[in-house]
Amino acid sequence: MVKQVQINLTPAAAADEVAVRKISATLAGIDQNEISGLRVIKRSVDARKKNIRVNLTVEVFSGDTSSVPVPGQYIPLNVTKAKEIIIVGAGPAGLFAALRLTELGLRPVIIERGRDVSSRKIDIARISREQIVDPDSNYCFGEGGAGTYSDGKLYTRSKKRGDNTRVLELLCLHGANDNIMYEAHPHLGTDKLPGIISNIRKSITDAGGQFILEKKVTDLIIEGNEIKGVVTADNEKYKSEYVILATGHSARDIYDICHNRGIELEMKPFAMGVRVEHPQELIDTIQYHGNSRGEFLPAATYNFAKQIDGRGVYSFCMCPGGFIVPSATSQEEVVVNGMSPSGRNSPYANSGIVVEIKPEDLLKYSSHGELAGIEFQKELEREAWKNGGHTQRAPAQRLADFVSGESSASLPKVSYFPGVTSSPLHNWLPKAIGRRLRDGFRLFGHMMNGYLTNEAVVLGVESRTSSPVRIPRDPEKLHHIRVSGLYPCGEGSGYAGGIVSSAVDGMRAAEAIAKTIL
């Protein structure tokens, strides 16, 4: 027998397994000794009032232990001699497409421009210490993709396109904490992700799949309206009638390849802005109504979304207890992003605060056609590089100064390791972005008393929230609308927004190919 119960507890009681078991038994109407298993299926913190509570949804099993669910399994086939499917990109979409292909009896061949997770650490460190950006191995490119060293948030609002739970199960099977299965906003942590990614690669190669790292795809082989493979920078050709394009939204050269090959592209909305950093203690005090966070509450988060003058202004990728990291993919640009370790124990809280950009806002860049949004991104990133001092130092300004239009004579300590340079962002950000950001921060200050403060710093620029381009595909068969066998998927193709939705989209691409072949 199984019963589902709802429990509302203090944070301390919610962390006490004995207390949870006792209350679960009482609410289920059974004796504790009759419980054969407990499973938390949802956990969330309710901090709307000063008396903070934790809500748990628990499944209580009694009687026959066979009723207790068995965790999902990964059972690949031996695909060493199976039909090969090329996957371009080893981010979430590419890796989960590969995992699914091995389950379906097809052999994934993953081609990735960047280096393995361990080697990437060296290249990432050079950005901060030496101000040098390797265009093929950085926070965005390399095994695991942009998510590997950028937090590992697993929260997604997308429920329509696939099995989100299966993604979480596979992550747990490869080393993630089981709590991602039930936390309201699950999170892996940048310190845990490299190990998880390495385990996923081992599963794929043990099944007979192949990884080809440090190979940049520079062209697609197309005959008529059919894909036949890819070409890499060393002019090596890899042949297959099926290519999954899972390159991520920062692989801008892929859009150039598609454009040059006559592959249809289309503009889509995206967002750009800044990243703001507060002391985590300040955010905790505001969100927990002056209460101490203590050992049982997580580092507090926030979420904003407002319409200002016809465009959305919202928080993006909020990182409690986190750090701001340099996410440029070429030398003469500055791009900032955020991440948190699994413990979320940094003294800083940061979030992107961004403004919606629509295709009609890009008339100035119309000569670039469908790539107008990318050109806008590039221009703003180059401007940030100039205002940061022609290095990876980020241009920065105290938050209240930014809103009031005053230069900051000094800056507080920040988490961004390459360093910051005081800069009047209110002067050089595009007016349509800067004005809406200032209005947004004023509104957010009313929503969270104490948020609008000069203890906080804004850093520029947050420009890689999503792809400004979509590669159109058949909505049912998932291959490109004109090029048969080419399967664009994930964030870079405009069909996802984060680890989970990208992974789901990659698995869907694998299943669509299998349906055609098998």
Image (cartoon, helix red, strand yellow):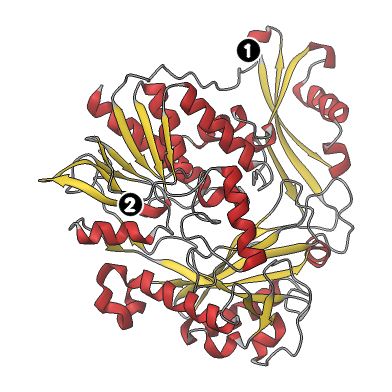
Residue at x-position 10% and y-position 46% = 224
- The label nearer to you, 2 versus 1, is 2
Residue nearer the viewer, 145 or 437: 145
Q: Earlier in the sequence, mark 2 or mark 1?
A: 1
Rendering quarter of residue 85: top left
Amino acid at the residue labelled 1: Ser
Amino acid at the residue labelled 2: Ala
Q: How many marks?
A: 2
Q: Is residue 15 left or right of residue 91?
A: right
Return the residue at label 1: 67
Q: Is residue 58 above or below residue 133?
A: above
- Cα distance in 3D space between marks 2 and 1: 54 Å
* Image mark for residue 233: 2
Where's residue 278, x and y in %?
75, 69
* Image mark for residue 440: none
Where's residue 312, x and y in %?
49, 71
Residue at x-position 62% and y-position 42% = 193
Residue lying furthest bottom: 406
Residue lying furthest top: 64
Residue 161 appears anywhere in the view: no
Q: Is residue 236 above or below residue 199?
A: below
